[in-house]
Amino acid sequence: MKKSTYGLILLLLIFTPIMIIYPQVSVNAAREGLQLWLQIALPALFPFMVVTEIFILCQLPQLLSVFFAPLMGPLFRLPGSAGLALLVGFTTGFPIGAILTARLVQEGALTVAEGERLALFTNNASPLFILGAVATGLLGDPRLGVMLAISHYLANLLVGLWYCRRWPPSPSHPSPKQKIDQRLFAHWRWWRARASTGPILGPAITNAMNNMLKIGGYLIFFTVFYRLLNTSSLVEQVTVWIGWGLEKISLSSNLAPGMIAGFLEMTIGCQLIAISDAPLADRLLVLTVLMAWGGLSIFAQVSAFLTPVGISIRRYLPARLLQSTLAVILMQLQLPWLSINVTASTASASYPSAMTYLTNTGLAWITGCYLALGIILLVYPLLRRQY
């Protein structure tokens, strides 16, 4: 039996009696986790999961590798098929980057070693979450979301460059030396031969919903875990210690409860940090850390999707620590440009539903990326260049 299994059994032995002693806390926490899943995770992630599955079933990663190879090869020493995971991971949020990476390994588009490196920098908080839920919904100013997004995404790209360039370039994947338009037309003929969308759309929806149920389970579990943890005096003592440490680095001790929550579940932690009484600059720095870290809930989700295909996650947590450090540095560099007119007076105590913030700048971010991809697919074949 693995050591992790012993740890899980010990955890259950400790928290099962607490659940029995505090049944109302458990029920309310489960309801809270379910609400987060229904109002935020499901509407924000499910459509993109379906699209991602369709991409895989249509073999689009292999086709699009022609376009992504000039970027992924020189910069990250990965094959072009990894480019789709990079694009999707940076536009849709946790844990779709890990899901797509695992599917690419399953389909043979990536080796296990390539998948391990790719997973280190393709899991991010989504633009919808940063620009909509946190900046607009909680902090009350979408301009703050731009600062958070720059720190978050640039730090993750630097993590990718740091890790990937420590390995030799991936061996080139053999491909027929056809003109790109010929390959696209061949793929179109293959698509039309499928006659019905049923064999593609049906499995795509099924796989996406199964993944969403798994994400929902982790979200509810860690929400219950955090709320039960709050019932113990140990959390109060840890809060005091963390608050003392924050004061030593000139940050507000009021951020300690949010940091504890964010260590386990990012969304709850970001909510507590955003509505705290700490100075705005302090809140931005800690929010940057929590989004880069992702929380143990996200780590468990990423592990659940990557481990079954043989991808090791031993470097994932160190990569998140590196991203957190880089993100704080990048945010610190931006703070001098923080306008004195930027306030958080309209901060809200709860997240808006995903339908509320799907109409803000986050949607424009995602739409722009996919429109750019569509334009490339339409225009590039006309150039009739060799691969």
Image: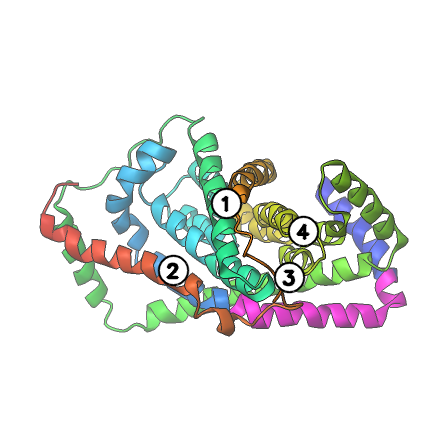
The residues tagged by marks 2 and 4 sit, at their Cα atoms, a distance apart of 31 Å
The residues tagged by marks 4 and 1 sit, at their Cα atoms, a distance apart of 16 Å
The residues tagged by marks 2 and 3 sit, at their Cα atoms, a distance apart of 24 Å
265 lies above or below 212: above
- Pair 3/4: label in front: 4
Amino acid carrying mark 2 in the image: Ile
Question: Of label 4 and label 1, which has the lower sequence position?
Answer: 4
Amino acid carrying mark 4 in the image: Pro
Majority SS type along the magenta span: helix
Which residue is denoted by mark 4 in the rendering?
279
Find residue 204 and report its horizontal and vertical position in percent. Answer: 41, 66
- Pair 3/1: label in front: 1
Question: Of label 2 and label 4, which has the lower sequence position?
Answer: 4
Left or right: residue 280 versus residue 209 is right
Say whether marks 3 and 1 touch (CB < 8 Å).
Answer: no
Which residue is denoted by mark 3 in the rendering?
219
Residue 104 colored in magenta in the image: no
Q: Residue furthest front?
A: 340
Amino acid carrying mark 1 in the image: Trp
Q: Residue at x 26, y 38 (%)?
A: 70
Over which residues does the magenta segment extend? 18-42
The residues tagged by marks 3 and 1 sit, at their Cα atoms, a distance apart of 36 Å
Left or right: residue 257 versus residue 56 is right
Disc number at residue 12?
Answer: none
Which residue is denoted by mark 2 in the rendering?
366
Q: Residue at x 55, y 56 (%)?
A: 342
The residues tagged by marks 3 and 4 sit, at their Cα atoms, a distance apart of 29 Å
Residue 30 colored in magenta in the image: yes
Which residue is denoted by mark 1 in the rendering?
337
Q: Residue at x 42, y 49 (%)?
A: 106
